[in-house]
Amino acid sequence: MHSALAAAFLAALALLHTSMAFVPIGGGGPTHVSITGTAILQKLRETCKAVAEASGHEFNPTGPSAEELVQACLGPTATGEVSAAKFRAALQEIYVQNGLVDRDFVNSAPHHFNSEAFLEGRGLITEGVISIKANVRNQNYQASREMLGRVLHTLQPYVNLIHPDLTIENIAAKDTPTCSDCGGGACPNPILANILKEKKLTSGYMGIFSSEKPKGKCSHGGVGDLTGSVAPRGGISKDERRPGNEAFHAAAVTMATAASLQLLEDIRSAAGDSGFLRLMGIARSAVVCFVIDTTGSMRDDIAAARSVIYDIINSKKGTQDEPSEYILVPFNDPAFGPMTRTTDPEVMKQKISKLTATGGGDHPEMCLSGLQLALTGAPASSNIFVFTDATAKDIHLKDTIIALIRSTKSTVSFFMTGASKRKRRSLRASFNDYKDLALASGGQAIEVSKGDLPEATDVILDTSTSALVTVLQRSRGSGTETFTFVLDESLKNITLYIITGPGMTFTLTNPAGVNQNHNELKGDLGTISHVGNLWRIRLDADKQTGLWKIKIISSQAYTLKVTGQSTITFIYDFVAPFGGPHPGYAPITGRPQAGHNTTLLVSVMGRKGPSSVMVGEVSLSPVSRDEAVSKGSATDMGNGDILVTVKGVPQGEFVVVLMGTDSVSNSRFQRQSTTQMSVSNVTIKAVVGSSVEPGQTLSLPFSVMTDGPGGAFTINAKNDRDYPMTFPTRVTLTTGQYANVSLDITPPATTSSGTDVTLTINAKSSNSKDSNYAVLRLSVVTKITDFTRPTCQVVRIMAEDCPEDTSQCGSFHWDISANLTDGNGTGIDSITLRQGDGDFSHTSLSGPGTVQASYNASCCSQIVEFVAVDKEGNVGICYHSIVRSAGPPSLGLARPLWLCLLLGAIMVRS
Ligand SMILES: *[C@@H]1O[C@H](CO)[C@@H](O)[C@H](O)[C@H]1NC(C)=O
Ligand SMILES: *[C@@H]1O[C@H](CO)[C@@H](O)[C@H](O)[C@H]1NC(C)=O
Ligand SMILES: *[C@@H]1O[C@H](CO)[C@@H](O)[C@H](O)[C@H]1NC(C)=O
Ligand SMILES: *[C@@H]1O[C@H](CO)[C@@H](O)[C@H](O)[C@H]1NC(C)=O
Ligand SMILES: *[C@@H]1O[C@H](CO)[C@@H](O)[C@H](O)[C@H]1NC(C)=O
Ligand SMILES: *[C@@H]1O[C@H](CO)[C@@H](O)[C@H](O)[C@H]1NC(C)=O
Ligand SMILES: *[C@@H]1O[C@H](CO)[C@@H](O)[C@H](O)[C@H]1NC(C)=O
């Protein structure tokens, strides 16, 4: 029995790091990604259930898909629909980082618990968990997700490593042999008998570049491991799925899943349920993000912005379209910011009411600096609205803004009011720069007079929904062209926008051949409004599904956009394959490489999960020219994930177009990405390997290469916090060769822990014809040494009144009080009731010493659980049950700790 369990543990170490024949997305071996997925979905179901029950409705997903989980988790479906795109994107970020540990840290033993590097591995987990908690506290969810993916990878082989307050015992000494030689290949258990008997902890040594390992030690095993050819030959994981070891394999997977669940529970407790759900991308996807010029001439514009924010808050309250977050960034000259980020509509109302128009006047303003804050602060794929009447003074940020737009996939729309003529124009910038940014992001550049602005802000209400999709977007010069697009049955609130100058006419035609002209403001197909350079056509609710046409005749350049609301949508990443022992595909942080096949990972969401849509075709389509699209060849990776390879990528900027069939309504659908992309000969490679402490300098190596003509390239790096940086501003490249350089960044000593920095590096050829970028996130995290959990001591329980017969429970009460302390720690920061619907209260947290908590509930509510989190994010749990039949009453003992001790005992001491 003992040795069987020990072997199971060793199998856990080995199996989870072994290459398999199947190449998963993101690499990392299917076991890592599937364990991570299983654990996350289970923890989310628990959290969603708790949240739903606390707010008085049932958690009842209509099926097992991510789409249905999100819909059920966010509340009753009657109040609208919500897209699962952000949830899928969040899961993808975690899975990708989970797998990338095998690319970026392939030769680092602690990241994989190879080579008996247990203590170092635990150091990584401890550091990672601190960083996750600090980032969640600051709402930096993306940084937290990326770190969570990495930590779960390292954790999965060995559960005891979550708990920095426990010791790791009995590691086999460096000179202690642990394995027997296995030349023949079929050795069921190569671990030496005395190692098992003495319950020593060991793991396989891994050599990617060298076959060296200490004498007598086990190898990791597998094709990527060179040490397996040196005696003792073979390896722990060599034949992981062979007949006869299924039970060990299952035990290993169970333990790794339990470990992952514990880690997720710890993070959930520290983050709170709503924070945890937002970390996982479960939030209504409508986000309001405004960037507002506050110089003297902007009074009317600010009033219009204020009125639309009030309108959104009041009209969407209680629906799935209610924004889950509000972001406001003011800018002036020369100041900009600070950014307000809040989930509370009242705070947003207050902030926007306090904005006043002052100063500036006749100067161009810091518009792009404000926009940079919004792009890095808002969740990915947000709709950002900029209100201004002047050109940008900080036009040098344009490349940085384009890189951020491409990497965040957010859309940026501008409301430019006429006063620009009164203002002194920047010599270098014009309103055309805003038009370029709007086009690059799939947003709109709306020019109206200040008086007409309130009529143009309907666009904002249209986009303020949790299920916005784009069906078509094109940009053209003057001329005549007919555009076709497919409207499916699921689409609601379909709106067409045309932005152009005077001298444009159009005719819209539905599938039955019914027409409406631009001058029929209320016609057979919908309602047309026209203000400034914006035409808005809202189709009637009883629209026909099928192929629509719009013929546009224009004497000026124009853009056309068709949007609607639907939960049938897709997310995508441009990816590149990577090799090594656990190969996979990783998203690229810049533009895809020119002259190569372009590969995308596309995830499609249907109304009832991926099985309710059929994908017909994925292609790359130029936005600004009527040119043939480049069709991709698709490989179904399962679960709605599709790997698409495109051979001849269009010249210039393109978008992703997806055609398919919705099997719920059996109608064809069309969707398009908003962000424009193009290929580049330049590649920038950079990986952020660790967080940085306040006041310390992080040196970040990166490499730049071009497949095009070599020569001098300028390097430009910016960060959104304005921290000091040093880097070479020029590199000389030879075609096809990486130049290795580095960038130093120093966050000030006063930076608060959990600050997230977005760093953009641009490399541009000297003739400006080619360039590429990398966008990196790094976290500023203070090293902490306090791992003491808050403790919970039950002082009093009064449950005698509760009747034996639970049908009588309604008229009786019980109560409990407990003392909570943080030992030598930093003090308790929050206490929340997790389970139970009685009255809960506690004494002030600000005072020193003990906090007293008390709880009083009906005898029908028999379990109470509350969570105390200290300032460092250490979690303590009080749990008490008065259920009589369930064995001995439990004490106020922190359950995860207890569970951990048990699992640790199983694994370490078998
Ligand atoms: C969308 O359409 C529904 C009815 O189909 C309507 O109640 C809602 O107000 C519309 N939303 C917007 C933003 O117009
Ligand atoms: C590009 O993809 C095609 C298949 O779509 C494949 O035959 C070809 O080898 C690929 N080319 C490169 C350079 O990878
Ligand atoms: C890449 O380099 C090739 C060869 O020098 C050139 O023909 C091509 O235009 C370049 N592509 C881009 C996107 O700059
Ligand atoms: C630069 O780094 C790359 C890996 O990114 C490496 O392959 C290459 O040899 C390095 N080049 C030099 C000149 O050090
Ligand atoms: C609980 O805390 C209070 C206030 O600090 C203290 O007076 C009391 O003795 C504590 N009870 C126990 C059992 O420690
Ligand atoms: C508090 O710290 C002191 C000194 O470091 C130590 O002796 C004591 O055991 C600690 N107490 C707790 C509860 O951790
Ligand atoms: C608990 O609450 C009930 C109803 O509010 C009250 O009657 C009872 O006295 C309370 N018990 C304690 C110990 O506070």
Image (cartoon, rainbow, N blue to C red):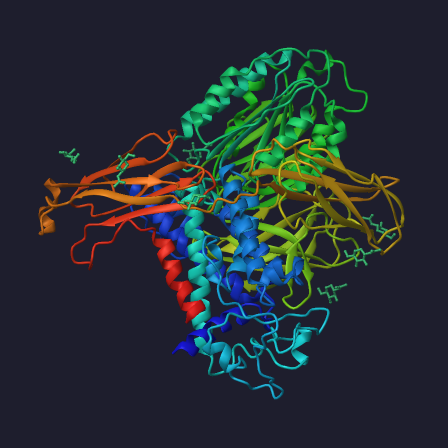
Which residue lies at the image location 71% right of the left edge and 39% below the top edge? 745
- In this view of the protein, which residue sits in the foreground, 352 or 833? 833
Which residue lies at the image location 54% right of the left edge and 48% below the top edge? 145
- Left or right side of 835 for 536: right
Q: Residue furthest bottom?
A: 184
- Left or right side of 23 for 891: left
Q: Quadrant of the N terminus?
A: bottom left
Ligand 4 is found in the corner quadrant, namely bottom right
Q: Position of residue 741 (x, y in %)?
A: 80, 47
Whether 306 is drawn above or below 6: the answer is above
- In this view of the protein, which residue sits in the foreground, 528 or 412? 412
Q: Position of residue 824 (x, y in %)?
A: 43, 41
- In this view of the protein, which residue sits in the foreground, 136 or 474? 136
- In this view of the protein, which residue sits in the foreground, 215 or 293? 215
Which residue lies at the image location 89% right of the left edge and 52% below the top edge? 734
Q: Position of residue 407 (x, y in %)?
A: 65, 43
